[in-house]
Image (cartoon, rainbow, N blue to C red):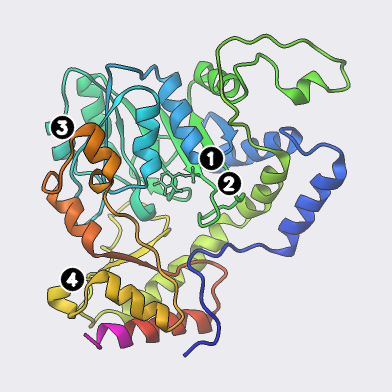
């Protein structure tokens, strides 16, 4: 057994990341400035989007995206219950109603048929989540959105490297939101990005991310002399700092190499867990790139002899950290109380919610750590 606990989602921070952050700390400017600009440009080029606007979280990205898309009270937005609460909370913060539709148990993504069935006259946008890094059926969502006149806002918190047959994630929908939270594929501690092809939205996103002011601080205090700002709308404090962007720049340079490493670990897990009574992640669809963010197995008590929580507890005893992504949003007390959701509403999401367990997966993991996970999972899966 391991001596040291293997932390789930521990980020890879290299000397080059530290040097870039130190350079920023020494530069005399640590707020939103040139490094945020450089990070936005690098991200936009990586994704192939027209515009990229950096913010301080994906939660902020989702909130601002829905606002610039004009979503507000009286509107409905369809999303998945199999997501982090931030996705649905962002809808609530605009004043709109979060409408869940069930997922496909195999892909863990929103089922386009269920989405279509949930459309009412009040629905203004679809908010699919590329769960675990697996691209959603964007062709189907584009077609549904076009037919019903809806906007397509994507939660790509897990899917920076993802590609759909329609193009790279971030260059397909109307607005796409990314996360650089500590466990994500690119890390800035806290951070997010919005990509869009519309320049007017990109400008509005920037203004609303910084109090609704017409000029950001970097421009106000620059060499060209102090300039007054004007408050155009009551905005938010959602801007990214140069310290965060400094971290992101190096991380983004390694994004593809890190994906290769996660693909290797993924393939090792697939081979090692083949004969075990666990449900393994479905292989990616043709003509897509899976961003390999979460390796999730489903633990069914009937098949394994242990439920998911007991399985996780035994892995923990073997010093292997795990995650649960997620308890379905409609099972959370707030969504039940405020929006009248109940267990039984989305059976597929509930099936996954009760059984899902994410195993450690990250570029920082050594071969030995990967083998430790393999041996521990095999031991626990056979112990039931
Ligand atoms: C699917 C999903 N959406 C949104 C978020 C929110 O991202 P952030 O923590 O950057 O606000 C997360 C995770 O943190 C997530 O996993």
Tell me which numbered mark, 3 or 4, is placed earlier along the sequence: 3
Q: State whether residue 220 is above or below residue 345.
A: above
Q: Is residue 381 a member of the stretch shown in magenta? A: yes
User: In 3D space, how far apart are the residues under numbered discs 2 and 1 (Cα atoms)?
Assistant: 6 Å
Name the residue carrying label 2.
190
User: In 3D space, how far apart are the residues under numbered discs 4 and 2 (Cα atoms)?
Assistant: 34 Å
Name the residue carrying label 3.
116
Stretch in magenta: 379-384
Secondary structure of residue under mark 2: loop
- Tell me whether circle 3 and circle 4 mark residues in contact (CB < 8 Å): no
Of badges 3 and 1, nearer the viewer stands 1
**Ligand 1 within 8 angstroms of badge 2 C-beta:** yes
Which residue sits at x=27%, y=44%? 333
**Ligand 1 within 8 angstroms of badge 3 C-beta:** no
Label 1, residues with CA under 10 Å away: few <14, some 14-19, many ≥20? many
Q: State whether residue 50 is above or below residue 334.
A: above
User: In 3D space, how far apart are the residues under numbered discs 3 and 1 (Cα atoms)?
Assistant: 29 Å
Left or right: where 180 falls relative to 26: left
Q: State whether residue 45 is above or below residue 228.
A: below
Locate residue 128: give its quadrant. top left
**Ligand 1 within 8 angstroms of badge 1 C-beta:** yes
Left or right: where 67 falls relative to 202: left
Label 3, residues with CA under 10 Å away: few <14, some 14-19, many ≥20? some
Instruction: Point out residue 84 in the picture as x, y percentages from the top left corner.
Output: 37, 47
Name the residue carrying label 1.
57
Secondary structure of residue under mark 1: loop
**Ligand 1 within 8 angstroms of badge 4 C-beta:** no
Secondary structure of residue under mark 3: helix
Tell me which numbered mark, 2 or 1, is placed earlier along the sequence: 1
Tell me which numbered mark, 2 or 3, is placed earlier along the sequence: 3
Tell me which numbered mark, 3 or 1, is placed earlier along the sequence: 1
User: In 3D space, how far apart are the residues under numbered discs 3 and 4 (Cα atoms)?
Assistant: 30 Å
């Amino acid at each position: 057994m391991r001596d040291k606990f293997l932390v789930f989602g521990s980020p890879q921070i290299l000397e080059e990341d530290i040097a870039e952050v130190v350079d920023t700390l020494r530069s005399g400017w640590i707020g939103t400035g040139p490094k945020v600009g450089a990070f936005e440009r690098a991200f936009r080029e990586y994704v192939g989007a027209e515009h990229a606007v950096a913010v301080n979280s994906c939660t902020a990205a989702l909130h601002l995206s829905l606002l610039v898309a004009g979503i507000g009270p009286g509107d409905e937005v369809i999303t998945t219950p199999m997501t982090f609460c931030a996705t649905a909370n962002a809808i609530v913060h605009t004043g709109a109603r979060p409408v869940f539709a069930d997922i496909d148990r195999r892909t863990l993504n929103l089922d386009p048929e269920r989405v279509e069935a949930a459309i009412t006259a009040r629905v203004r946008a679809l908010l699919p989540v590329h769960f675990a890094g697996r691209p959603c059926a964007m062709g189907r969502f584009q077609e549904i959105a076009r037919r019903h006149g809806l906007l397509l806002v994507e939660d790509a918190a897990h899917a920076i490297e993802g590609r759909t047959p329609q193009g790279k994630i971030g260059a397909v929908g109307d607005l796409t939101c990314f996360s650089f939270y500590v466990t994500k594929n690119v890390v800035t501690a806290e951070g997010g990005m919005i990509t869009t092809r519309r320049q007017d939205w990109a400008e509005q996103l920037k203004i609303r991310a910084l109090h609704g002011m017409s000029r950001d601080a970097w421009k106000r205090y620059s060499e060209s002399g102090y300039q007054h700002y004007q408050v155009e709308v009551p905005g938010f404090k959602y801007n990214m700092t140069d310290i965060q962007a400094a971290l992101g720049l190096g991380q983004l340079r390694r994004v593809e190499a890190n994906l290769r490493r996660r693909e290797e670990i993924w393939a090792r897990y697939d081979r090692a867990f083949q004969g075990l009574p666990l449900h393994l992640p479905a292989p990616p669809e043709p003509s897509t790139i899976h961003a390999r963010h979460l390796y999730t197995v489903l633990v069914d008590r009937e098949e394994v002899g242990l439920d998911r929580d007991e399985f996780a507890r035994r892995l923990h005893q073997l010093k292997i950290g795990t995650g649960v992504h997620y308890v379905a949003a409609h099972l959370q007390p707030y969504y039940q109380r405020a929006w009248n959701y109940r267990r039984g509403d989305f059976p597929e999401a509930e099936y996954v919610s009760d059984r899902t367990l994410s195993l450690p997966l990250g570029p920082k993991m050594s071969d030995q750590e990967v083998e430790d996970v393999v041996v521990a999972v095999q031991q626990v899966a056979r112990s039931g």
